[in-house]
Image (spheres, helix red, strand yellow):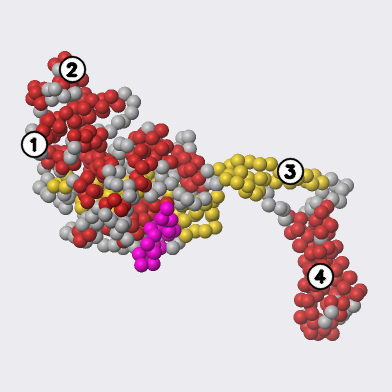
Amino acid sequence: MTLEALMHGTPGLITAYAAVQAPMFAGLARGRAELGKYLRSPLPAAALTVGIGAAFSLLEPWLHAAAATWGALVPFTLGTVSSAAVGYIAGRLIAAKEPADSTLRRGALVDEAHVSRRRAVSASASAAVRLAGLEVPAVDEAKHFKLIGTTGTGKSTAIRELIGGALRRGDRAVIADPDGGYTARFFNTERGDRILNPFDPRSMRWDLFAEIDNVYDVDQLARSLIPDHGGSDRIWAEYARTFFTAVTTQVREAGVNEVGELYRLLVIADAAELRVLVRGTPAQPFLDEHNAKMFDSIRSVTGAAVGPLQHVAAQQAAPFSIRHWIAEDQPGVLFMPYKAGQIAALRTTISAWMRLGIFEAMNRDEAPAASGRAVRRALWFVVDELDALGQIDGLKDALARLRKFDARCVLGFQSIAQVSSLYGAGDAQTIVENCGNTLILRCSASEGGGTARFASQLVGEREVRRSAISRSWRATEFFASTTRSEHLSIEPALLPSQIEQLPDLAGYLKHASGPVWRRVTLATTAPAQPARGADAGGLARE
């Protein structure tokens, strides 16, 4: 059936079109549309006319029955009213529709549409590790990871997924473990895992003297236990390291390898005994009688750094060397678990252990083939609460070099202010920059913006072209006068307030080599890998 036949001839077609077009003009006028929309309105009016005609053709039997019952004007009235209503509503919609008021030109890319809810898959499905459900490209693994978020947002959940995948494929790890959560989930004696914590009955006994193979290793130990803290305290840390190095070297040369005796000399022994011990070393001037006050300050700094050695000396366990464990390249994980109540006693020691491991990793050959193996096991260093531990001296430089030695770091922190306070603003910035893979979870704000603003700045800015339309209308004019302007603006790709309002287990992930920040949702539970061994629950039970 032709359109003319459908509308009962040309007059009916024209009448139907007019019934749509005239109300459409009224809707455009009511919406104060610009002239261009009036000129373009015949096309949608014609399309609507055809659509209405087709709809009424389906109702033709019912319309004939209505005309026979109530009169011929009923179908005509119904068609006219329907056409007018559709035309008017369409006119209002066309008048209200505006072109996009902004267009991204360049800058940071944020994918809000894609929210990953995939859980980690088994190693048989993929050898790649995953973070927030997304595979980490192999080229990005050695570019390190930083996870930023306030407490309870999912940092540990994300790290468990990442490290779980690494361990399933045979990688090694050194984990500073707040509350023992990673130990409870992953500890496996059959794999060769080890624990270091003098308050944990499962722990090995750290053998400080076993870390010394060469004379310069004593300096590394001193730097690990007594890092710089900046400001006026820097010189006292240097003096304390000199004192520690002198005493440790003399004790070792005397054939004494007892940590308890070293602790006694560093912290308890009287000045007269020490004066004899360090004679002829750079620490000798500290023990001069007229430098008594100076030596008291030096010993105070030293005592605070080596205090945990008294707990190590009291252990009845097999000796263990961090450096030797790293160098042997055997399977396993080294856990350093600690409870909240132990952090004051263990903060400097755990940081020192982590530093020893990191710098020993950089003593390995760069080329895997040099060790006689086709492929060397990747080594992961995990510090879940970077801002809660003591300073890991040299971390910023190590991050720049570790990738050459098949090692990668995973750092989590809650507050950039605390990291800056611990490492200094410059070093903290370098640490952040050297971690190429970034997961941002909910962050808190404070005066000056806080971590939420810092995270927003990490995501970056974008250049946006914005359109502005203004209209003027006078009662004597039928058409609105429209003015359109465009301008470029630079704005944050993610506002700090958006980051503050993220729910738990949700955030934004960017891989080091990828250009896009992706909105992600973490799986509520990581793939289970029950801990195995005596009293595997340890410090924490989940």
Q: How far across and how far down the image is residue 532, in percent?
A: 21, 61
Q: How far across and how far down the image is residue 513, in percent?
A: 47, 50
How packed mark 2 is, by other alpha carbons closer than 10 Å (few <14, some 14-19, many 20 or more), is few
Mark 4 belongs to which amino acid? Answer: Thr
Query: In the displayed structure, would residue 364 be above or below residue 43?
Result: above
| Label 1 or label 3, whichever comes before in sequence order | 1
**Residue that badge 3 annotates:** 485
Residue 291 bears which disc, if any? 2
Q: How far across and how far down the image is residue 262, in percent?
A: 12, 34
Query: In the displayed structure, would residue 227 be above or below residue 21?
Result: above
* Side (left or right) of 516 relative to 433: right
How packed mark 1 is, by other alpha carbons closer than 10 Å (few <14, some 14-19, many 20 or more), is few
**Which circle, 1 or 2, is nearer the viewer?**
1
Q: Most extreme residue toward the top, as rendered?
A: 290
Spatial CA span between label 1 and label 3: 82 Å
Disc 1 to disc 3: CB gap under 8 Å: no
